[in-house]
Image (cartoon, rainbow, N blue to C red):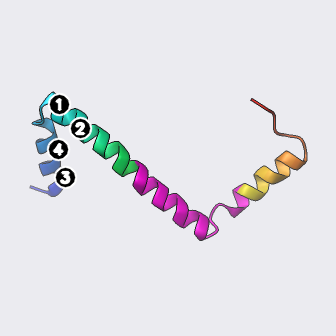
Amino acid sequence: MNSLQEIERAVSQLSPEELAAFRAWFAEFDAAVWDKQFEADVAAGRLNTLAQKALQDLREGRCTDL
């Protein structure tokens, strides 16, 4: 059995209270992983083209207030 199957089995056996706690923990964990990847992408310049395009759109009046 692989570890993913073991995790799935363990999660499926959690009580409702434990599942709620796991869900909250996982949401925080997942957000932290996403933040770390986003920061790495910014540091590597992977978002520069998108930022330049957004700034160009702003300068040329293609942005609106919500």
Q: Amino acid at mark 1?
A: Glu
Magenta stretch holds residue 38: yes
The Cα–Cα distance between marks 2 and 3, rounded to whole angstroms, is: 19 Å
Q: In the rendered image, which quarter contains the C terminus?
A: top right
Given the image, on which type of amino acid does mark 3 rest? Leu
Which comes before the other along the chain, label 2 or label 3? 3
The three-letter amino acid code for the residue at tag 4 is Glu
Q: Residues within 10 Å of mark 3 (few under 14, many from 20)?
A: few
Secondary structure beneath disc 4? helix
From the image, tell me which residue sits under label 4. Answer: 8
Q: Nearer the viewer, mark 2 or mark 4?
A: 2
Whether label 4 touches label 3, CB < 8 Å: yes
Q: In the picture shown, does residue 32 fall above or below 48?
A: above
Q: Position of residue 13 (x, y in %)?
A: 9, 36
- Which mark identifies residue 17? 1
Question: Callout 2, which amino acid?
Answer: Ala
Q: Disc 3 marks which residue?
A: 4
Q: Nearer the viewer, mark 2 or mark 3?
A: 2
